[in-house]
Image: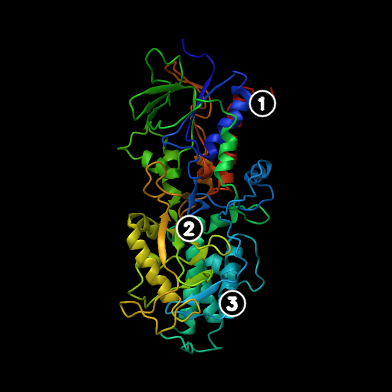
């Protein structure tokens, strides 16, 4: 005899899935009002949260930041479980040192030049995000002409307007002491550096793919942005700690979900009239009244392909269109262990690449990363971020290729710096040798991981916040009785995850809120709230 209690199966043991499981179990599962089960295709919990260790330092391979501490549920949990302090070194990015900005060729840039372009870029971003109303109307005019287009287009029009405003003040002169660079090309290189930082924030491979209008809807919590000393996994482990042994099943990858769109799909005896039938890759099956799907948008994009057959019957058109229109990008982190030949600290390096005359010694996959910095003060472990096609290419490279590429890049940028050996110290190939040797690397590989197929979502050109709301809609929304007399149970398939939150997409707290939302949807359906 199967259980007569409503059964809820949650697919995915990441932030959204475990938040939903935590809420459902504490409210109704422990009182035997609901049967709750989490199935996870991988061999660990956490999803895109993956705390690890590299050369004795605690690091994050996935989610890294608490984006604002005021009002953040993630911060509240981390504070409650004393995870914000640790005796072990961690990826805290606590360096107070001013960034050292160097242009390709080894030219240290004056901070006033960098700050002028930084101020311009930040002003444009503040306007795009609805934080700033300009008095001169320039950004308003750009925004009007940019209607329906991308954030990248808006930013570049802003740079063009800046150049136009200073056109009479100076000619595009060569910068003294900096070969191959003019004032304009330096400004463009600095601007591109800030664009590349923004790419890693959004996961958009190119800011031309990012919808301009949607920027105003994205919300950040107030307060500082911090990392979690004892690791993001401590929050995940806390959420899972209330769940009894066996409730989370690892290594259970779902191949297909059969549901009843019109009540006509009938299951064999043994289903106990449950509405959804899950098929696993190992050939086993499971029945459920409700399934909360928390897989990534990347997996859903793959799942709506006709050849995939992830859903039977296929999801309705309005749902598949939203899945198709939204963007889902790849962001990867690369950690490097240095073996300095002298007792020197590596700078917080910001790299300005030439946009039209690239150095052929620096590999192309390096040219759209923006910075390289120690993960905490005085650390010999460095971190660099990659997005888009460069992030995917990084996944395909072996460690020797990565070490060689970074060694050449570091040498090129620190050529004329105090962080470089004197010119008479040459290595075997006749080139100056850096004080810093890369001896070990560790990279994330979110794009090629079949359980994720990317990192996080963004609102692409042609999409909107409405698509994020559509992502959150359950199927079907309500009970219906058809003309053929068939009955369609409600809330068979529910959706959670960062890509289902209109204002906090791409974040762990967005995933948390979405898991709570779907748990509460079911608890309200059964009138289990405040029982």
Q: Position of residue 271 (x, y in %)?
A: 42, 16
Labels 1 and 2: the sequence-earlier one: 2
Say whether residue 146 is visible. Answer: no
Give 243 or 448, whichever is nearer the viewer: 243
Distance between mark 3 and mark 1 Cα atoms: 54 Å
Asked if the residue under mark 2 is in contact with the one under mark 1, i.e. CB atoms within 8 Å, the reply is no
Of residue 378 and residue 26, the one placed in the foreground of this image is: 378
Q: Which quarter of the picture shows residue 259? A: top left
Q: Which residue is mark 3?
A: 116
The residue wearing badge 2 is 210
**Label 3 secondary element:** helix
- In the image, is residue 263 above or below residue 77? above
Cα separation between marks 2 and 3: 25 Å
The answer to the question of whether label 3 and label 1 lie on touching residues, with beta carbons closer than 8 A, is: no
Dot in front, 1 or 2: 1
- What is the number of the mark on residue 202? none
The residue sitting at 38% across, 17% down in the picture is 267
Determine whether the residue tagged by mark 2 lies in a helix, strand or loop.
Answer: loop
Q: Secondary structure at mark 1?
A: loop
Q: Residue at the location (52% across, 57% down)?
A: 201
Position above or below: 363 against 315: below
Q: Decide: marks 2, 3 in contact (CB < 8 A)?
A: no
Q: How is the image coloured?
A: rainbow
> Residue 424: x, y in percent?
39, 85
Residue 508 is at least partly visible in this image = yes
Horizontal side of 68 relative to 61 (left or right) equals right
Q: Which residue is mark 1?
A: 529
Position of the C terminus, as image quadrant, is top right
Q: CA distance from mark 1 to mark 2?
A: 39 Å
* Mark toward the start of the polypeptide (2 vs 3): 3
State which tag comes first along the sequence, 3 or 1: 3
């Amino acid at each position: 005899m199967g259980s007569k209690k409503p059964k809820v199966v949650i697919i995915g043991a990441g932030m959204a899935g475990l938040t939903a499981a935590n809420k459902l179990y504490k409210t109704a599962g422990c009182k035997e009002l609901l049967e709750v089960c989490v199935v996870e295709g991988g061999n660990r919990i956490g999803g895109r949260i993956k705390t690890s260790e590299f050369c004795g330092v605690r690091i994050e391979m996935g989610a890294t930041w608490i984006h604002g501490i005021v009002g953040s549920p993630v911060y509240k949990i981390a504070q409650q479980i004393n995870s914000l302090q640790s005796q072990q070194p961690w990826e805290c990015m606590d360096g107070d040192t001013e960034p050292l900005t160097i242009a390709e060729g080894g030219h240290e840039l004056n901070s006033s030049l960098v700050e002028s372009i930084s101020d311009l870029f930040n002003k444009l971003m503040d306007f795009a995000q609805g934080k700033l109303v300009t008095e001169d109307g320039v950004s308003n005019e750009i925004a009007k002409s940019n209607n329906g287009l991308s954030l990248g287009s808006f930013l570049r029009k802003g740079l063009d307007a800046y150049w136009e405003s200073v056109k009479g003040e100076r000619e595009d002169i060569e910068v003294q002491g900096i070969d191959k660079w003019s004032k304009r090309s330096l400004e463009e290189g600095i601007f591109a550096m800030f664009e590349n930082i923004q790419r890693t924030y959004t996961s958009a491979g190119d800011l031309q793919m990012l919808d301009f209008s949607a920027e105003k809807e994205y919300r950040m919590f107030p307060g500082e942005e911090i990392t979690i000393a004892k690791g993001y996994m401590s929050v995940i482990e806390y959420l899972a700690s209330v769940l009894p042994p066996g409730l989370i099943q690892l290594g259970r990858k779902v191949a297909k979900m059969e549901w009843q769109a019109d009540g006509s799909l009938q299951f064999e005896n043994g289903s106990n009239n449950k509405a959804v039938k899950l098929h696993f890759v190992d050939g086993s099956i499971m029945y459920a009244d409700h399934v909360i799907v928390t897989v990534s948008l990347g997996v859903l994009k793959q799942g709506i392909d006709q050849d995939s057959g992830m859903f039977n019957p296929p999801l309705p058109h309005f749902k598949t269109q939203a899945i198709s229109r939204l963007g889902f990008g790849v962001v990867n982190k690369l950690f490097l262990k240095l073996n300095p030949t002298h007792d020197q600290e590596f700078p917080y390096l910001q790299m300005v690449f030439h946009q039209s005359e690239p150095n052929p010694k620096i590999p192309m996959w390096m040219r759209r990363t923006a910075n390289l910095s120690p993960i905490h003060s005085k650390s010999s472990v460095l971190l660099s971020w990659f997005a888009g096609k460069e992030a995917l290419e990084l996944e395909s490279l072996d460690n020797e290729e990565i070490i060689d590429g970074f060694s050449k890049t570091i040498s090129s940028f620190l050529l004329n710096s105090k962080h470089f050996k004197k010119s008479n110290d040459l290595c075997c190939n006749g080139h100056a040798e850096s004080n810093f040797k890369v001896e070990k690397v560790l990279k994330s590989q979110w794009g090629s991981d079949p359980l994720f197929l990317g990192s996080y979502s963004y609102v692409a050109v042609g999409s909107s916040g409405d698509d994020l709301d559509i992502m959150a809609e359950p199927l079907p929304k309500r009970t219906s009785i058809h003309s053929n007399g068939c009955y369609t149970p409600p809330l068979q398939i529910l959706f959670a995850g960062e890509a289902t939150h209109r204002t906090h997409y791409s974040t762990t707290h967005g995933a948390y809120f979405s898991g709570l939302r779907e748990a509460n949807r079911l608890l309200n359906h059964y009138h289990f709230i405040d029982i």
